[in-house]
Amino acid sequence: MNSNEGIVNLETDYLVIGAGAAGMAFVDEVLSRCKTSTFVISDQLARPGGHWNHAYPFVTLHQGSYFYGVNSEVLERDPREIDLSSKHEMLAYYDKVMRKFLASGRVTFLPQTSYQWREDGDEDHVVKSIILSGVTYHVTVRKKFVNACAQQIKVPSTHVPSYQIDKDVRENCVPINELGSLKRSYEEFVVIGNGKTGIDAVLYLLNQGVSPSSIRWVVSRELWWYDRKWFGPSSAQDFIIEIIRVLGEEDDTGAIFRRLEDKGILMRMQDDPDAEDPKLFRCATITKAERDAVQNIKEFVRLGHVTRITRDRIVFGDRGSIPTTANTLHVDCTANGLPRQARKPIFGDDTITLQPVLSCNVTWSSAIIGMLEVLEGNNEDAKRSIIKTAPHPEAKEDWVAAFYVTFQNLVALSKKYRRQGFDGMRLSIMNHGPMLSTLYKEHFVLPKILDKMLAKAEIFLNKYDSPSA
């Protein structure tokens, strides 16, 4: 079609909505395993990479690059280290992967297009161009419609804060993205938001030479954090083994978290023996050195959620307020990167909804779903029986449930698909350690603790999934 108006008719095996981390991992796996499948990928953005396009300029992965991305393309620079790829490296990586997709001749990419969610009775799927108002794609799907946007990832640059900002201070309230392009200096910085984005903002300011005495951090709720040292290629299996052991030996969620904290897998922002245990978990991963670096800032503000910022006060509802000034920059980091979503069936008769089947892991989960789609063909019941959606962990009970589901899924997959290459996937966190050590742990350590944990998983999940629980 040469004009800027009209209908374009397309036919494909899979229509994938979203060219972010989930969609790209799924397409890569199906494309690699089935040499005839075709794809149309629609995304509202101009290039692949999903939320990485909107991420703040100094963001990096918070876990190792060696198990992120897609199975068929290496991302890490050094497979022996916890290599944290930057935003720009991630976008270049996904550009490279998309070029490989297109070179196959089996993928059509429709950038800057918007999928029109179907009404009952609609036959074709409709995708409209965002730039060319008269261009519409009617897509006939032979196999599956794939929703790769179900996680609804939120990023600071597109997030609207829930608190009120008075008109005369709006220029002093910015998302974290703008820290990399400030036009002037400030006497003080107030970081609002206590997750991974919040600590990234504090660390960025410190690394730029801002005095710790000029930084305040609003921490509305205490979080549990992973210690990144456990996510190295040679330590990841130990991480898995320790969690299996603790889940198999402890019955109480509080006891589970205390054991993992004693082991050093989980940590809190400040080691205060009198402080209440954190109740929130957001999959965030930092090092102890990063945690220690922020301890000397001027103040951790623990008055709950900000409700309003005025010319001279930051208000926390009925819990009080703290002073602010016209020469203070307020940095919003309150976007919940992975908001909690209701779990949905992954495999419908003619749809696939990409969701985590492994705790806090989108890319490997999506590749696993792609693998099942190919290996089980039209046997939807088999696919549904092998994997379940892992809950997104926020409370302690969610975290425990997510790992029980994770291990149930991994055991079922490993038993059935070992010969089909499941255990050798690049995206598997467990496949990058020294070979002899990996084999020893797999054959001599895991079997001794796995059955006990799986028995407890059934009991816990039956209660967790009960409507009355």
Image (tube, helix red, strand yellow):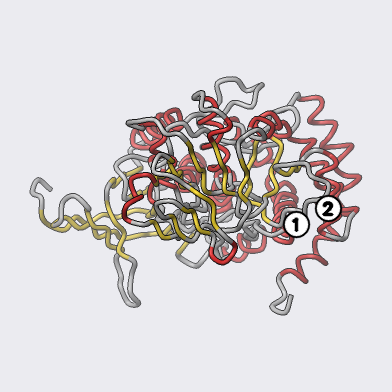
Residue type pointed to by label 1: Val
Location of mark 2 (residue) = 256
Q: Seen from this angle, which residue lies furthest left?
A: 3
Q: Are marks 2 and 1 in contact (CB under 8 Å)?
A: yes
Asked if residue 185 shows in the view, the reply is: yes
Sequence-wise, which precedes: disc 2 or disc 1? 2
Location of mark 1 (residue) = 400
The image quarter containing residue 266 is top right
Q: Residue at x 63, y 62 (%)?
A: 382
How many angstroms separate mark 2 from mark 1 (CA)?
8 Å
Asked if residue 40 shows in the view, the reply is: no
Residue type pointed to by label 2: Ile
Percent position (x, y) of residue 255?
86, 55
Q: Secondary structure at mark 1?
A: helix
Percent position (x, y) of residue 71?
54, 36
Q: Secondary structure at mark 2?
A: helix
